[in-house]
Structure formats: C-alpha cells, structure tokens
Amino acid sequence: MVAVVRVHEYGGPEVLKYEQVDLPAPGPGEVRVRQTAIGVNYIDTYFRSGHYKAPQLPFVAGNEGAGEITALGEGVSGLAVGDRVAYVAALGCYAAERNVPAAIAVKLPAGVSDEQAAAMMLKGMTVEYLIHRSYKVQKGDTILVHAAAGGVGLLLTQWAKHLGATVIGTAGSEEKAALAREAGCDHVILYRTEKFPQRVKEITDGALCAAVYDGIGKDTVVDSLDCLRPLGILVNYGSASGGVENFNLGLLAPKGSLYVTRPTLNTFTAKREWLEEIAGNLFKVVADGTVKVTINKRAKLAEAADVHRALEGRETTGSIILTP
C-alpha cells in the first residue's frame, strides 16, 4: 500500500483525502519512483476545484515530483534503478511512490537536489519557456512580472535580471515586495494600494514594457495591456484570480498593435528533445547559482489541505514542497 492524496469530488481544500492505495508494478514504458519531494503549484488547486477537469474521479493530485527510480517497466531505456529523476506529470504526484512514464522523467545532475527539483520543475521550466520562447527577453528590455514574490515570479525575476532586463514586479505586501527586491526586482508596485498601469508609466517615463508576464488572469489582464509599449506582448500563463473570458481583441490595435499569448508547458515539452533542452537550461542556471530556488514552506503529504488553504489565501511565497 502507498500513501496518496486523492480527490473524490471537486471542491475546496477539504476534498483532499490522505489515503492508502495499491500500486501495481510499472507497466511498459514506465518507471517506479520512490518520491522524496513533491512540488505544490497553483495549478493543483485548479484541478482540485474542478476549474480544470481531471480525466476521471477519483484522482491523485499533484503535477511534479522528484525521487529515486526503484523499478523499470518493459522497454525502458536510458534510465536505471537508482537514478535520481524529476518530472512534470498530468496529476498523480501527491504520493509516496508512483509509476511515471519514462518519457517525462529527466535525470537530475549532481548540482541539483531532489528538493530543488521538486520545487522548480513546473515553475522553472515554465519560466524557461516564458523568457526564451513566449517572448525572448533581451538585454535592455523592461518587463513587468505580476506576483513577483510567488514561485514563478522569484525564478523569473532572477533569470530575467541575468539576461540583462529591467524588472518591474507587483506584490501584495511590503513583506512580499522585500522578497521580490531580494530576487532582483528593480521596482516593486504594491498592487493593493497603487494602480500598477500608472506606476509602470511613471517608472518607465512613458516608455512602458516590452512584455508583461501575467499569471493572475481575470483581475489584471486588461490593465496589463496599458503597461505595454507598441508591439509589446502580454503573456498570460495562469489564472490565479479566475479565467479570462470574453477578451476583446479590438483593444489590441489602439493600444499599439499589441500581442497576447496564452502558452502552456505541454506545448513546449511535447517532444523529448524539447523537454531535455528546457530542463537542461534550467538545471544549468540553478546548479551554477544564477537562479536560486526559494523553498519557504515544507509540509507532510498528509497536510496537503492546509497547504492549499495557505496557497489560495495568498499567504505563501516562493516554492512549497510536500514530503511523504
């Protein structure tokens, strides 16, 4: 029997149930992983609440993890028992052990710990495609990063600063603003008391931003357009405040022939070579210290419901990990 956290019906954090289930041997093309660290991400709340639908109910929550391979299924090559691996998966990660498709498991280099990997795989690979593929951040660019003290925000800020960008961040408190500045934000806007489009205009002397990275969604998307220079791009990669509905494309022309994109990691890692390239780029900047992974909360797997409450209450910063 293996400890897992399952969802039997969509709802609030209380629907996360700590249970014991049977785990079969890994099937063809799978590896069995004894997990040492499990990442917690905002997308986990989308699946738990039903904002994103799972393929079936009940399901085991969670979208990233790290640990050691303990068994191989038929036909697996390139991986071995004892390898440390990390992965981003479509559900199933809130578990002490699990079977994982070998195609999505990436070997961890010596310079990256299991905890770092579990805390950054989804967020870190997201940041890699955001700043290298959705919009390629260049030296001299000014960008706006919403929720700059969050898990994605802290990684994005550090990496963008390394690339030579000026980073403006938004945060909800002085405490979070301090974390964003520590990560490298040149300017931090307290969005609860300041109007961020007006502040961006003031900070940039009217030049505005090349790109806005927005994981908030409904509450920020339209105002974010007013932070962009002509031909700028709004990258909406999350919906922490709710999904964006009935978006008026007609706004883009008068505001400067703007671009809007809604990317997803699955597109950028659809081929094994793409996955390895993105993960390799992430591992390099973490191993050499360019990007530091901040883990500000650790909890046991059985405490997953409490972690979700804190996450949705915007009480967390940096990354969160669960341990079996």
Image: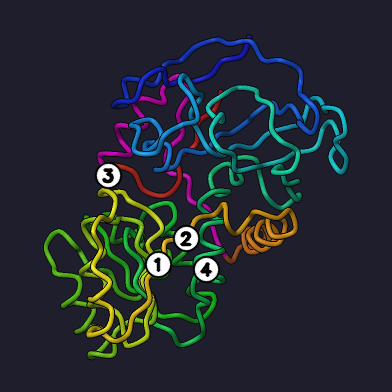
**Which residue is labeled 1 in the image?**
235
**Dot 3: element:** loop
- Contact (CB < 8 A) between labels 1 and 3? no
- Examine the image and state in which quarter residue 232 appears: bottom left
Name the mark nearer the viewer: 2 or 3.
2
Q: Which mark is residue 263?
A: 2
Secondary structure state at the residue bearing disc 2: loop
Instruction: Calculate the distance from the C-alpha at mark 4 to the C-alpha at mark 3.
Output: 23 Å
The tally of labels here is 4
Q: Position of residue 235 (x, y in %)?
A: 40, 67
Question: What residue is disc 3 on?
Answer: 314
Tag nearer the camera, 1 or 3: 1
Q: For the residue carrying disc 3, how many other residues have a C-alpha within 10 Å: few (<14), some (14-19), or many (20+)?
A: few
> What is the C-alpha distance between the residues marked 2 and 4?
19 Å
* Residue type, numbered disc 3: Arg
**In this picture, is 100 found above or below 281?**
above
Residue at 72 percent of width and 56 percent of height: 276
Residue underneath mark 4: 159
Dot 4, how many residues are within 10 Å of its Cα: few (below 14), some (14-19), or many (20+)? many
Which span is picked out in magenta? 291-313
The amino acid type, in three-letter code, at marker 4 is: Trp
Q: On residue 72, which mark appears?
A: none
Determine the residue positioned at 35% across, 76% down. 186
Looking at the picture, the colour scheme in use is rainbow
- Give yes or no for contact between labels 4 and 3 (Cβ–Cβ under 8 Å): no
Residues at discs 2 and 4 in contact (Cβ within 8 Å): no
Q: Kindly state the secondary structure of the residue where label 1 is placed.
A: strand
Q: Earlier in the sequence, mark 2 or mark 3?
A: 2
The quarter of the displayed image where residue 259 is located: bottom left
Of the numbered discs 1 and 4, the one sitting upstream in the chain is 4
